[in-house]
C-alpha cells in the first residue's frame, strides 16, 4: 500500500501514461552503478576489438594488435622466435615453453640426451621419464596400428595384422639401435608369393610341415614329413629349422607366436592349414611408415626405451 504513486508523489516521476483510469507507471532513473557498469562494458568491448581478433569481414577477420611470441626449434635444433597475432594456438606454444611442467620436461630431456640407453634404463628416474614420455608419444603416433597398449592386431586377413609389441618376441630384433632405426626409417616386410611353385597336395604338405614346426595339435605327420623337403625353398630366409632371421625380418616359425597369420584364432587344424597355405600362395607385405621426418631423434630414443620394455626386454 505504501508503494502507490500517491505516496511517492513528487519524489518519483511517472511516465504520464494512465491505464484503467488510475494505473500509472514510474519513470525510475537507472541506478548509477548499473549505468557505469553498462558504459564500462561498452568501453571494454571497444578495447577488446582493437586488441584481439574480433570482427569477421571479407572472408577473414580483424586480427587485433596484440601479439604472442614463442620460440620454435627446427629439425637441426636451431631455435628462432616467432611472433603471431594473438591466437590460442600461439598461446599454447608459449605456455609449452614456460609452464612449470614444460620446463621440467625440458630439463629431463636435456638430462637423458647424452645418456646411453643402458644408463637411461639403469636409473629408475630416467627410466620412468622415458617410459612416460614414450607412452604419450606411442598413443599419438603408433597406437593406431599397434593398439593403445602395443598389443597389436592378429587379423584373419594377414594384411590387416600388426605385430604385437608386448610379447618378448621380435621379428626385427630387440637391440635399442635396431628399434631406433626401425622407427626412424620404417619397415618394409616382404615375403614373395610361392603360389606358382606349390599347389594342391604339395602346398598342403608344406603347410602341414610349417605347422608341425610349432607343434600344432592335429597336424598330419605323414603330410608334414612329405612337406619337409619343400621347406628348403623357405630356409634361405626362415632358417634351416624355421627359427627365423631377424636380419631380414623373417619370423621364427618354431615358436607358438604368430605375428601376421592368425593360426591361434583358427579352431580346427584344417583352418590353420588353409591360413598357412594362403601365405605361401600369396606371400606377405607389410609396411610401417618411417617416423624420422616426423619425430625428433630424442623422441625416437624415448619411444625405443618404451617399446623395448613393453616386451619385457
Ligand atoms: C625372401 C625371404 C622369404 C622366403 C623365401 C620365405 N619367407 Fe616366409 N616370411 C618372410 C618375411 C619377411 C615374412 C614377414 C612378412 C611381413 O613382414 O609381412 C614372412 C612370413 C611368413 C609367415 C608368417 C609368420 C607369422 O608369424 O605370421 C609364414 C607362415 C611364412 N613366412 C612361411 C614361409 C614358407 C612356408 C616359405 C617357403 C615357401 C617362406 N615363408 C619363404 C620371408 C620369406
Ligand atoms: C601404419 C601402421 C603402423 C604405424 C603407425 C606404426 N607401425 Fe610399427 N609396425 C607396423 C607394421 C606393419 C610392422 C611389421 C613390419 C614387418 O615386419 O612387416 C611394424 C613393426 C614394428 C616394430 C618391429 C616389431 C618386431 O617384432 O620386430 C616396432 C618396434 C614398431 N613397429 C614400433 C612402432 C612404433 C614405436 C611406432 C610409432 C612411432 C609404430 N611402430 C607405428 C605398422 C605400423
Image: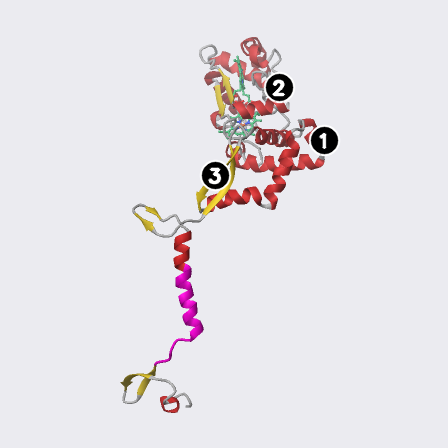
Q: Give the residues in magenta.
A: 27-44
36 w.r.t. 89: above or below:
below
Q: Is residue 216 visible?
A: no
Mark 1 CB near ligand 2 (8 Å cut):
no
CA separation, marks 3 and 1?
Answer: 39 Å
**What secondary structure is marked by label 1?**
helix
Total numbered circles: 3
Label for residue 172?
Answer: none
Callout in the foreground (2, 3): 3
**What secondary structure is marked by label 2?**
loop
Q: Is residue 41 magenta?
A: yes
Label for residue 254?
Answer: 2
Quadrant of the rendered image holding ligand 2: top right
Label for residue 82?
Answer: 3
CA separation, marks 2 and 1?
Answer: 33 Å
CB atoms at circles 2 and 1 under 8 Å apart? no
Q: Nearer the viewer, residue 103 or 135?
A: 103
Callout in the foreground (3, 1): 3
Q: Disc 1 marks which residue?
A: 122
Q: Residue at x 52, y 43 (%)?
A: 94
Residue 304: x percent and y percent? 61, 29
Q: Nearer the viewer, residue 99 or 172?
A: 99
Colouring scheme applied when the structure was drawn:
secondary structure
Amino acid at each position: 500500500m505504501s508503494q502507490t504513486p500517491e505516496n511517492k508523489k513528487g519524489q518519483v516521476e511517472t511516465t504520464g501514461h494512465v491505464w484503467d483510469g488510475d494505473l500509472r507507471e514510474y519513470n525510475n532513473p537507472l541506478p548509477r552503478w548499473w549505468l557505469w557498469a553498462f558504459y564500462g562494458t561498452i568501453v571494454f568491448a571497444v578495447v577488446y576489438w582493437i586488441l584481439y581478433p574480433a570482427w569477421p569481414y571479407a572472408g577473414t577477420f580483424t586480427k587485433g594488435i596484440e601479439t604472442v611470441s614463442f620460440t620454435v626449434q627446427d629439425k637441426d635444433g636451431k631455435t628462432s622466435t616467432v611472433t603471431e597475432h594473438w591466437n590460442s594456438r600461439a598461446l599454447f606454444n608459449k605456455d609449452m615453453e614456460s609452464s612449470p611442467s614444460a620446463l621440467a620436461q625440458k630439463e629431463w630431456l636435456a638430462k637423458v640426451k647424452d645418456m646411453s640407453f643402458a644408463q637411461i634404463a639403469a636409473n629408475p628416474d630416467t627410466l620412468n621419464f622415458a617410459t612416460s614420455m614414450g607412452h604419450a608419444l606411442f598413443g599419438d603416433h603408433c597406437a593406431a596400428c599397434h593398439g593403445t597398449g602395443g598389443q597389436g592386431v592378429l587379423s584373419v586377413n594377414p594384411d590387416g595384422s600388426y605385430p604385437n609389441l608386448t610379447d618378448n618376441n621380435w621379428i626385427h630384433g630387440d637391440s635399442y639401435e635396431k628399434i631406433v632405426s626401425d622407427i626412424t626409417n620404417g619397415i618394409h616386410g616382404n615375403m614373395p608369393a610361392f603360389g606358382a611353385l606349390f599347389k594342391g597336395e604339395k602346398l598342403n604338405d608344406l603347410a602341414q610341415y610349417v605347422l608341425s614346426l610349432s607343434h600344432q595339435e592335429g597336424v598330419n605327420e605323414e603330410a608334414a614329413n612329405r612337406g619337409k623337403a619343400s621347406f628348403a625353398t623357405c630356409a634361405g630366409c626362415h632358417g634351416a629349422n624355421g627359427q627365423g632371421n631377424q636380419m631380414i625380418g623373417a619370423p621364427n616359425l618354431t615358436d607358438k607366436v604368430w605375428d601376421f597369420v592368425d593360426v591361434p584364432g583358427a579352431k580346427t587344424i584344417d583352418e590353420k592349414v588353409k591360413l598357412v597355405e594362403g601365405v605361401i600362395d600369396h606371400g606377405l607385405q607389410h609396411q610401417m611408415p618411417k617416423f624420422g621426418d616426423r619425430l625428433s631423434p630424442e623422441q625416437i630414443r624415448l619411444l625405443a626405451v618404451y617399446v623395448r620394455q613393453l616386451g619385457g626386454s
